[in-house]
Image: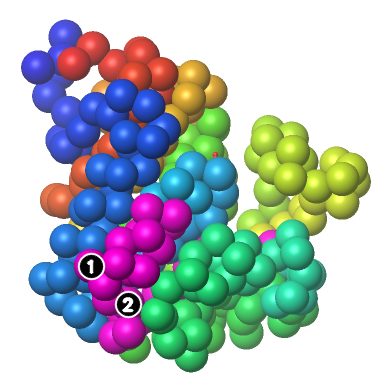
Amino acid sequence: MSMEGVCMLKIVRARDYKDMSRKAANIISAQVILKPDCVLGLATGSTPIGTYQQLAEWNKKGDCDFSQVSTYNLDEYRGLSHDDPQSYHYFMKVNFFDHVNIDIANTHVPDGANPDADAACAEYDRIVAEAGYPDLQLLGIGNNGHIGFNEPDDHCFSKGTHCVDLTESTIQANSRLFDRIEDVPRQAYTMGVQTIMHARTILVVANGPAKAQAVHDMCFGPVTPSCPASILQLHPNVTVVADEEALALCEL
Ligand code: F6R
């Protein structure tokens, strides 16, 4: 037990990135085996890439069948077309969907190409609800504690899918994937915290020292909109798979 109190989230300690990826893939694979037509909520970013690679490997071996799975991604940059190499549509295609036997018609990402933010977000909320919400939602965590693109903000706990202005810290963090920081979109459509909390199980992956404070605050800090991930303490079924560096500030 932590000196700081009981953590409501189940924490799985991983040795390193590879171990984190394999453990997370095992949890997702178990979900797919238990319910072959499950709904998965998926994330982009650097953290889950190894998890997707591991799942693709098991899929090739015939051990994890995605043919009946449907997926709903958390977010997409506003203003990028689906085939823009910086879009999350594209990311999911090259990092996961192209490598497994998923039916691409069953994969969903918010429509960043739709300039009508209200319509794009309302439609996304509608289809996620119609699918019955994810059986398992995979999340990364931002250095500032964001989940999806729900940035620290007084109202971040109360929203469904919506358009957000990205914070300077997120623009900085994401600029590593763009040629120039000016190219990083300033807005995104994201599933809201309300939508995320509907998932029946949640799996958070985190690695590296830059995540240590956010992981600590998510697990042991107060539940506050200044760390959006802290809301997960109120969800009944959250597992955090994190490496030693990301857990460095957690006394376990
Ligand atoms: C991505 C997403 C973000 C990332 C977070 C961490 O779909 O919703 O919340 O999970 O920014 O990103 P990485 O993994 O690149 O550190």
- Report the residue at 47% width, 80% height from top: 107
Q: Is residue 6 visible?
A: yes
Spot the residue most to the front.
Answer: 61
Residue 204: name its quadrant: top left
- Report the residue at 72% width, 81% height from top: 114
Crowding around mark 1 (Cα neighbors within 10 Å: few <14, some 14 to 19, many 20+) is: few
Q: Position of residue 49 (x, y in %)?
A: 49, 50
- Report the residue at 69% width, 42% height from top: 174
3D distance between C-alphas at marks 2 and 1: 10 Å
Residue 175, compared with residue 242, is above or below; it is: below
Question: Does the residue at mark 2 contact the one at mark 1 (Cβ under 8 Å)?
Answer: no
* Nearest the eye: 143 or 56: 56
Residue 41, compared with residue 130, is above or below; it is: above
Q: Position of residue 162 (x, y in %)?
A: 57, 67
Residue 235, compared with residue 18, is above or below; it is: below
Q: Position of residue 118 (x, y in %)?
A: 63, 78
Q: In the image, 114: left or right of 18?
A: right
Q: Is residue 69 magenta?
A: yes
Q: Position of residue 196 (x, y in %)?
A: 36, 61
Task: Name the residue that disc number 1 marks.
Answer: 63
Q: Is residue 233 visible?
A: no
Task: Name the residue that disc number 2 marks.
Answer: 66
- Residue numbers of the magenta segment: 52-77
